[in-house]
RNA sequence: GGAGAGGUGGCCGAGUGGUUUAAGGCGAUGGUCUUGAAAACCAUUGUACGGUUCUCCGUACCGCAGGUUCGAAUCCUGUCCUCUCCGCCA
């Protein structure tokens, strides 16, 4: 979520930034937001002033009723006089009469009961306008919130402004491209031939875009996960194990909802969802907390399965395990101060690249342009591995700075050193890495003419094998 | 799944309709004292929004959402969560 104050103070600048994202729908909401914000403040100010008067009159009423220094006759006279003052909107006099600070003429014909009934009736009249005001403010606030939730994060000034992913800027590839003395096969041929991927039985169990890994395939995935986790741990990330089912609020907190609601699986009849990434859980780990600057940065790494309905990409990437409903990913995540977050984005992206380099697979970094940033990132890098079998670059990591966009939604704040004024932290996430595509890259890059696959050096201790071949 | 108990500030915990400030304690911070520390004593002590502006003022928040009332932490309804016991279970 953006800071409402920013939209209020610089609406035109915000529109210009959203223009860079080519998000017309969001752009159209800005004027509405400014208008609602103005209405909201006007009503709040007016209603809260009235509420202040009511609160203080009610307190005075209680004070009068419980006053032990006055007898019933004086109380009755004061209640009667205060009710009169209220009829004339003279709140100060009414208060003074009830407090006992203003003199009152005794009238012993007055009974306390009817006098207090009059006073209560007078107080009651003040109330109804206030209730209406708060009800209206609530309506406006909920409409305002609704609009705010659909506004994407704004691009960092260093992000190239282009409309689509075709303009993403590729850095020079790193690693050695292999010269094949035969035609490299795609993984959807290699996997079944080696007996390590079983597409048919995956489909039998759960439908299209599900698969089964068998034998060395299953073990390779497990080896990769361990290697990824250890790599991140070596860089100072704390390993955490998180729930794979979370409340809807967590998905709002991580800025997946409301925009990507239909990409996530929900448990029937429950407010619980299968995580599309461990990022959702980690973002909310410190939800509603106020951290100290000395605690930052907080670095977490978690492995989790990721569940995605992939409705929007029906028909794309249907062959193999490039795009599936369930995959394994190791996610790096950092909570930082605003001053350091862009440096951290660079180093974290570097960590993801180090892992690729360690696996000795050719890879490249992509600098994502404004139009392809997605909803919550201000700046993003993708890492892609080359896959000679399918002949394409496969995204294996995505590293983003979201600044305070998620932190504001999940209410993760900190006290800057020496200050008691809270500030939102910045959050960054980066895959390190996702398994199915890394397995594709390993199989396709390291295949031999006989269909066997050579295992990268760093994985051998984890896997306990140098080569996978058909048994 | 069944039964019961409970959710109050950073933490513990009192508070069954008002008498302007959620008691008290712990912790934290500042100060006094001290060569220094401890102890003792004194003071301060949340978040958000709004109005004013650099200082205050106001409103809201006692799990959450409604309701009753002139007035709700307190009464009513719903809901979520936690704990204990039973059942089931890797």
Image (cartoon, coloured by chain):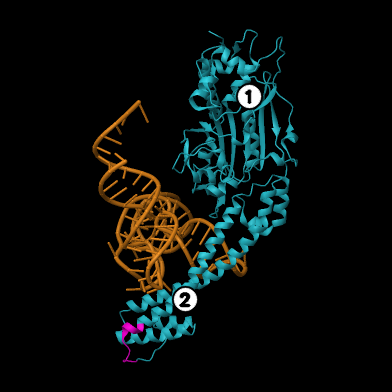
Chain colours: A cyan, B orange
Residue A448 rendering spot, x and y as whole percentages? 64, 10
Compared to A322, does A80 lie above or below? below
Residue A215 rendering spot, x and y as whole percentages? 50, 15
The stretch drawn in magenta includes residue A117: no
Relative to B74, A166 lies left or right? right
Residue A456 rendering spot, x and y as whole percentages? 60, 16
Q: Residue at x 50, y 69 (%)?
A: A132
Residue A412 rendering spot, x and y as whole percentages? 53, 47
Q: Is residue A222 visible?
A: no
Please identify, in this view, whether the residue under mark 1 or under mark 2 is nearer the observer.
2
The stretch drawn in magenta includes residue A111: yes
Task: Read off the residue under disc 1.
Answer: A356
Q: Which mark is residue A126?
A: 2
Relative to A304, A374 lies left or right? right
Estimate the spatial distance between the alpha carbons at disc 1 and disc 2, rounded to whole Å. Answer: 69 Å
Q: Quadrant of residue A85?
A: bottom left
In primary-sequence order, the first of circles 1 and 2 is 2
Q: Residues within 10 Å of mark 1 (few under 14, many from 20)?
A: many
Q: The residue marked by circle 2 belongs to what chain?
A: A
* Magenta part of the chain: A107-115
Q: Residue at x 72, y 54 (%)?
A: A13
């Amino acid at each position: 979520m953006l800071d409402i104050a920013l939209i209020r103070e610089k609406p035109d600048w915000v529109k210009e930034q959203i223009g860079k994202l080519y998000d017309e729908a969001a752009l159209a909401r800005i004027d509405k937001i400014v208008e609602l914000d103005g209405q909201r403040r006007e009503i709040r100010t007016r209603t809260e002033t009235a509420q202040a008067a009511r609160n203080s009159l009610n307190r005075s009423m209680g004070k009068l009723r419980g006053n032990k220094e006055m007898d019933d006759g004086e109380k009755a006279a004061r209640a009667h006089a205060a009710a009169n003052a209220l009829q004339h909107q003279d709140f100060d006099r009414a208060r003074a009469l009830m407090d006992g600070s203003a003199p009152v003429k005794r009238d012993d014909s007055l009974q306390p009961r009817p006098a207090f009934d009059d006073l209560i009736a007078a107080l009651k009249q003040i109330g109804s306008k206030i209730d209406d005001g708060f009800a209206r403010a609530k309506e406006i606030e909920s409409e305002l919130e609704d609009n705010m939730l659909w506004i994407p994060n704004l691009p960092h000034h260093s992000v190239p402004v282009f409309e689509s992913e075709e303009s993403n800027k590729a850095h020079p590839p790193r690693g050695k491209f292999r010269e094949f003395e035969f035609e490299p096969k795609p993984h959807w041929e290699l996997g079944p031939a080696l007996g390590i991927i079983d597409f048919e039985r995956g489909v039998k169990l759960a439908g299209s875009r599900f698969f089964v890994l068998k034998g060395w395939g299953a073990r390779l995935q497990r080896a990769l996960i361990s290697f990824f986790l250890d790599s991140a741990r070596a860089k100072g990330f704390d390993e955490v194990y998180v729930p794979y089912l979370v409340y809807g609020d967590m998905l709002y907190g991580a800025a997946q909802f409301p925009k990507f609601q239909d990409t996530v699986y929900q448990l029937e009849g429950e407010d619980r969802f299968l995580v599309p990434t461990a990022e959702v859980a980690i973002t909310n780990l410190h939800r509603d907390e106020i951290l100290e600057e000395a605690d930052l940065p907080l670095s977490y790494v978690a492995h989790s399965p990721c569940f995605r309905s992939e409705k929007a990409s029906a028909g794309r990437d249907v062959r193999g395990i490039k795009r599936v409903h369930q995959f394994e990913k190791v996610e790096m995540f950092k909570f930082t101060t605003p001053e350091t977050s862009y440096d951290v984005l660079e180093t974290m992206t570097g960590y993801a690249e180090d892992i690729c380099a360690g696996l000795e697979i050719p890879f490249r970094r992509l600098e994502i342009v404004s139009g392809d940033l997605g909803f919550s990132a201000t700046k993003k890098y993708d890492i892609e591995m080359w896959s000679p079998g399918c002949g394409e670059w496969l995204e294996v990591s995505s590293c983003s700075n979201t600044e305070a966009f998620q932190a504001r939604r999940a209410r993760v704040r900190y006290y800057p050193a020496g200050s008691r004024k809270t500030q939102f932290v910045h959050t960054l996430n980066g895959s390190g890495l996702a398994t199915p595509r890394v397995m594709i890259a390993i199989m396709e890059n390291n295949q031999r003419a006989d269909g066997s696959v050579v295992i990268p050096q760093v994985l051998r201790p984890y896997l306990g094998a140098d080569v996978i071949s058909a048994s």
